[in-house]
Amino acid sequence: DKYTKIYAERTGKSRELFERARRVLPGGTTYQIRYFAPYPIYITRASGVKVWDVDGNEYVDYWMGHGTHILGHSPDFVVKAVNEAAYEGTHLGYPNTLEVEYAELLAKVIPNVEMVRFSNSGTEANMYAVRLARAYTGRRYVIKMEGGWHGGYDGLHVGVSPPFEGPESLGLPPEHIKYTLVVPFNDLNALENALRNFDVAAVIVEPVLGSGGCIEPQPGYLKGVRELVDRYGALLIFDEVITGFRLALGGGQELFNVKADIVTLGKIVGGGYPGAGAIASRTEIMELLNQVKRPNARARSFHGGTFTGNRITLTAGYTLINYLSQHKPLYESFNDLWNWVRGEIDRACEEYGRICWATGVGGMLGIHFTRSRPMNARMAYADRIDENLYSLTHLFMRVKGILYMTEHTAHLLPSMIHTRDHARVLMEEFRNLLSEV
Ligand code: PLP
């Protein structure tokens, strides 16, 4: 009550905006996960690690544009490069120099990647990756993880939230997910069972389960997945939309030293600009998209789209990734800092009677108010002590000037420019929260 009152006192303009928004935007938002009760704050400005709302409140942002801004909001050198590029044409709609250069750069920094196609979002990248895997293997089934979020594409929009079965949306015919199998993350037996019983084209997995809880793979799990996928002749798709350029420059493949057949990218690959996505793989697989070698559309796998390879996104992405490739030691300090924070938060949870657990790897941090340490999405949901703890934590933190998403899950995706001091404030406030609940 105390915090609800403070929140109401400080966010009058956001409340008014929400009233207007509700009439013209369903739920008052553009994406349901951006809502929180009783009304969300409306942001007017972002810079570095901070965002400001219409009422002038300042927050340290741990959501960072859905995990997009690995170097903080609007890094100068990226914005400058984009502004200059914009005057030369925002979207050329023809083959262009930059798409060649950026594809070369990605093939250099991402393990096991020889060729790239740019798409407009992570959703699209995954949709085309699944199609490509089916084209390559001549098989139909796809296995995904419970809690695995790969975007709103029909074929992967199942098994995202409890009860982890059936369509995740109205308007999604069950026939569209007939060939999608769902198994728990960190469970090799369930995976093998599915592989043994169905003609599986691909297993799609996030190296660290993202929106399903920021849950780390158990030691040996990803290697086990790789072995099983090989044994049953399927392809392994790593959805690196969150983990790419976050866990390491080369993403989860590099950090865990496990080879994927197809990697999908989003978020950071666009350098903070929209239209961020890519499918990356080895030549043998990617050549199924080659219109020169396969002039007959029916003998090739489709990928395309109006804004693919647009200059704005590619300029931002190239400029950012090029910078990161020249500053690789940043990853070590980034991972060290957030592994330390996770340890400290977990220790605090232990001190306060184990009502919570900190999960994740490096700059992917999950906090769970569960009875045991969650190893998969089912545990992250079913094992909850009290649903209200999540919304209370969210409210408490935003009153303290700390923002993350969502109200129903506590996931933090810090940037490399969040400092040890920011982390200290976060940990201190988390301890304050625990001492109050
Ligand atoms: N894959 C993962 C792991 C994601 O976290 C997301 C988005 O959050 C997507 C795919 C979908 O990407 P987009 O929202 O760019 O379509």
Image: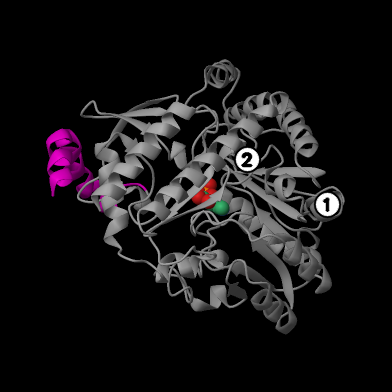
Residue at the outermost bottom position = 197
Q: Would you place residue 36 above or below residue 322 in this image?
A: below
Q: Residue at x 39, y 52 (%)?
A: 351
Residue at the outermost front position = 351
Residue 406 in percent (x, y) is at: 37, 50
The mark found on residue 308 in the picture is 2
Q: Nearer the viewer, residue 207 or 100?
A: 207
Q: Residue at x 30, y 33 (%)?
A: 401
Q: CA distance from mark 2 to mark 1?
A: 18 Å
Amino acid type assigned to the residue bearing label 2 in the image: Thr
Q: Nearer the viewer, residue 397 or 106?
A: 397
**Is tag 2's residue or tag 1's residue first in the polypeptide sequence?**
1
As helix, strand or loop, the secondary structure at mark 2 comes to loop
The mark found on residue 307 in the picture is none
Amino acid type assigned to the residue bearing label 1 in the image: Glu
Taking the image as drawn, is residue 304 in sight? no
Q: Nearer the viewer, residue 145 or 370?
A: 370
422 sits to left or right of 386: right
Q: Are marks 2 and 1 in contact (CB under 8 Å)?
A: no
Q: Would you place residue 382 above or below residue 388 in this image?
A: below
370 sits to left or right of 394: right
Q: Residue at x 69, y 28 (%)?
A: 329
Q: Would you place residue 234 above or below residue 268 in this image?
A: below
Taking the image as drawn, is residue 2 in sight? yes
**Magenta region, residue range:** 1-30
**Residue linked to disc 1:** 287
Residue 157 in percent (x, y) is at: 51, 65
Kindly indicate the quadrant of the structure image that contains residue 64. top left
| 10 Å crowding of disc 1: few (<14), some (14-19), many (20+) | some
| 10 Å crowding of disc 2: few (<14), some (14-19), many (20+) | many
User: What secondary structure characterizes most of the magenta part?
Assistant: helix
Q: Is residue 4 magenta?
A: yes
